[in-house]
Image: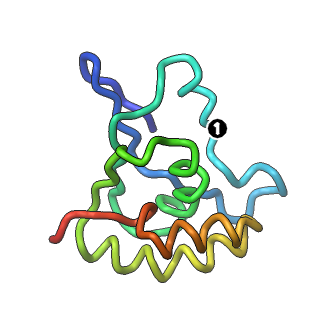
Amino acid sequence: MLIEIEDHRILIDAGIRMGARPGAHLPNLSVMDDVGEPEEVLVTHAHTDHTGALPVVTGGLGASVPIRCTGATRAITRVLLSDAVKIMGLREQAEECVDDGRCVRGEPA
């Protein structure tokens, strides 16, 4: 979900649809083409239906876009992303994302 408050855009969660037909498991991000990219990403919790598409979403955003989450969410997401990337077939992109911490940065709880 992309919300806009005045001129500030926040993407809330970036998950995958578990059990979806091939090609339909990633979120539709075309709304960003119309309204612009978010200034930050807020991850509510670590389930893959909220975090599984972070490698795809953050891969297209600038390096300065913060990803906000609790420390616990960050720790669990690091583990769960390795499974999600297998499902998405984006192993190389996600491993880079996980290794450099870009996809799972967060604030301590």
64 vs 6, left or right, is right
Q: Where is residue 86 in the image (x, y as percent from the top left)?
A: 71, 75
Outermost residue toward the bottom in this view? 79
Q: Which of 103 and 50 is in front in this view?
A: 103
47 over 29 or under it: above or below: below
Residue at image location 24% in from the left, 16% down from the top: 6
Residue identified by numbered label 1 = 28
Residue at image location 59% in from the left, 23% down from the top: 33
Quadrant where the image shows the C terminus = bottom left
* Classed neighbour count for the residue bearing mark 1: other residues with Cα under 10 Å, few (<14), some (14–19), many (≥20): few
Q: Nearer the viewer, residue 26 or 32?
A: 32
Quadrant where the image shows the N terminus = top left
Q: Position of residue 77 (x, y in %)?
A: 43, 73
Display colour scheme: rainbow
Looking at numbered disc 1 in the image, what kind of residue is underneath it?
Asn
Q: Position of residue 32 (x, y in %)?
A: 54, 27
